[in-house]
Image (cartoon, grey):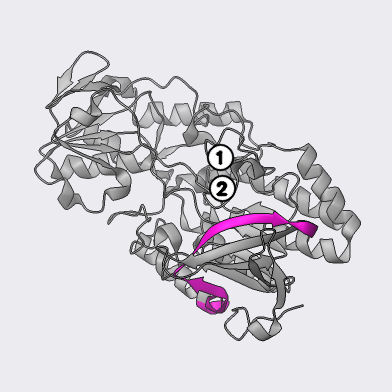
């Protein structure tokens, strides 16, 4: 088995000469595992794989860690005022708590410092190739993978290395999902996607139309209410707006208590509706559309300020766009408005350009892999995706246990092959298994999961793998 150098890099003296299927030279990395991306998911993947005794090579296209939470990165969707929408205890890694004196909802700069300390504490940087992007991943014999890399930006020669397994952690909030509207090309005002939004100064004194009612769209609308000369907020349907605090506690902590008590969904929905009626009241009186679904059937909008600014007239709710003209926007109710700036907060789509989409079960190539537990790939037991989740609470604890399960699966392939084979058969037969409950069918909810049900599913899988 080849051994990495002091910095986790392939050592030419310990790699075995090999060739790819088309004759290209390959550096065989033996039992080493490849991790793609050094964001939150990639970091916990490196940490857990290394703890289970595996060599790890991580390829990160940027020059630092943190992924989406590193505002310096070109693909980061973070803007100046970004804070967590899940509270601190439900966001931190289970084996590396955030400081007790941090606020309930930390700022993005604190999150980056948290990842920096996490990487230093577990000595993860020695495994990471910074400034290196993955060009291609190809399956080869014995469930192994050829991974071709090059310097970010396409400079320098390509290099191919062979790995025992691959864990993809490249994130799913960096490739903008852009809407198509009639007349968009003729509109003479400024148009941007929320991925390009950085600071309220971009809104100051302008007539702004924000399109989209996700958490980002609501945040930008709130900032436009304070900085723009006028703000319209366009939504296709009605949503449930959850305050960040309920009964004096972060809302996700209250909800988690109800889940831990196994309060049925219908009762949690009744309690939520009752609480809103007693506090905010009927949102349709502000001009917001009535939701066409019950609460918990879409990802919650965690925003305590949107309704406040709508109620004060600083945000004008409007329906969807029908078409755009050169100097105006026509809405589906026939009204015309004249924004100077249109911001599409319309979300993101996952992209895996380095891998044949059919390997992940995305036969139509739309960016929606069909994975077991949203992580494991049918028919490819040594390939997994980390962090492809949209939970109703914090993401990082879920990804931690995804990485633990993958590491133990790889270990079982060497020590208990029958157990590993049974697990792989279960993955293949249960392809597409979801633990999200009943949600609206939209790209925004492709990867929706209830965190309690999902953690229980991971626990069952770990028990099954270990024969307990």
- Disc 2: which residue: 388
Position above or below: 380 against 440 = below
Q: Residues within 10 Å of mark 1 (few under 14, many from 20)?
A: some
Identify the image quadrant of residue 121. bottom right
| Residue at 37% over, 60% down | 108
Per the image, label 2 sits on a secondary structure element best described as: loop
| Spot occupied by residue 331 in the image (x, y as percentages of width and height) | 24, 19
Quadrant into which the N terminus falls: bottom right
Q: Which residues are magenta?
A: 120-142
| Residue at 32% over, 27% down | 235
- Tell me if I can see residue 325 in this picture: yes
Quadrant into which the C terminus falls: bottom right
Identify the image quadrant of residue 140. bottom right
Contact between labelled residues 1 and 2, with CB atoms less than 8 Å apart: yes
- Disc 1: which residue: 447
Side of 432 relative to 208 (left or right): right
Position above or below: 231 against 199 = above
């Amino acid at each position: 088995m080849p051994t990495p150098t002091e910095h986790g890099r392939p050592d030419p003296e310990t790699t075995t000469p090999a060739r790819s299927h088309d004759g290209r030279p390959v550096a065989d990395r033996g039992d080493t595992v490849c991790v793609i991306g050094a964001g939150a998911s990639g970091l916990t993947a490196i940490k857990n794989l290394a703890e289970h005794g595996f060599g790890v090579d991580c390829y990160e296209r940027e020059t630092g860690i943190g992924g989406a939470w590193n505002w310096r990165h070109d693909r980061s969707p973070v803007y100046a005022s970004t804070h967590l929408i899940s509270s601190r205890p439900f966001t931190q890694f289970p084996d590396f708590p955030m400081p007790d004196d941090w606020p309930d909802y930390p700022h993005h700069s604190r999150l980056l410092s948290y990842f920096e300390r996490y990487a230093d504490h577990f000595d993860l940087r020695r495994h990471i190739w910074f400034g290196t992007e993955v060009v291609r991943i190809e399956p080869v014999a014995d469930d192994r993978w050829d991974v071709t890399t090059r310097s970010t930006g396409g400079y320098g020669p390509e290099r191919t290395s062979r790995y025992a397994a691959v864990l993809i952690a490249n994130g799913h909030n960096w490739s903008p999902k852009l809407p198509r509207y009639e007349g968009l090309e003729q509109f003479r005002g400024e148009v941007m996607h929320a991925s390009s939004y950085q600071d309220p100064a971009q809104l100051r004194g302008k007539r702004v139309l924000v399109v989209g009612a996700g958490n980002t769209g609501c945040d930008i609308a709130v900032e436009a209410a304070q900085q723009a000369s006028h703000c319209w907020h366009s939504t296709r349907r009605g949503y449930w707006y959850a305050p960040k605090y309920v009964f004096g506690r972060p809302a996700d902590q209250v909800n988690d208590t109800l889940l831990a008590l196994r309060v049925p969904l219908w009762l949690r929905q009744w309690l939520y509706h009752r609480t809103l009626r007693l506090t905010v009241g009927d949102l349709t009186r502000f001009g917001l559309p009535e939701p066409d679904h019950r609460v918990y059937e879409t990802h919650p909008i965690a925003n305590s300020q949107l309704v406040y600014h709508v109620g004060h007239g600083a945000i004008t709710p409007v329906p969807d766009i029908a078409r755009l003209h050169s100097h105006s926007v026509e809405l589906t109710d026939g009204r015309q408005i004249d924004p100077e700036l249109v911001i599409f907060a319309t979300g993101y789509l996952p992209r895996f350009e380095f891998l044949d989409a059919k390997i992940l079960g995305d036969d139509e190539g739309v960016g929606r892999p069909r994975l077991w537990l949203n992580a494991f790939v049918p028919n490819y037991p040594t390939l997994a995706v980390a962090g492809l989740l949209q939970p109703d609470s914090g993401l990082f604890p879920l990804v931690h246990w995804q990485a633990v399960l993958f590491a133990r699966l790889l270990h079982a392939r060497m020590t208990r092959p029958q157990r590993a084979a049974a697990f792989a058969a279960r993955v293949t037969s249960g392809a597409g298994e979801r633990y999200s409950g009943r949600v609206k069918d939209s790209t925004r909810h492709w990867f929706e999961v209830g965190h309690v049900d999902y953690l229980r599913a991971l626990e069952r899988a770990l028990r099954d793998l270990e024969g307990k």
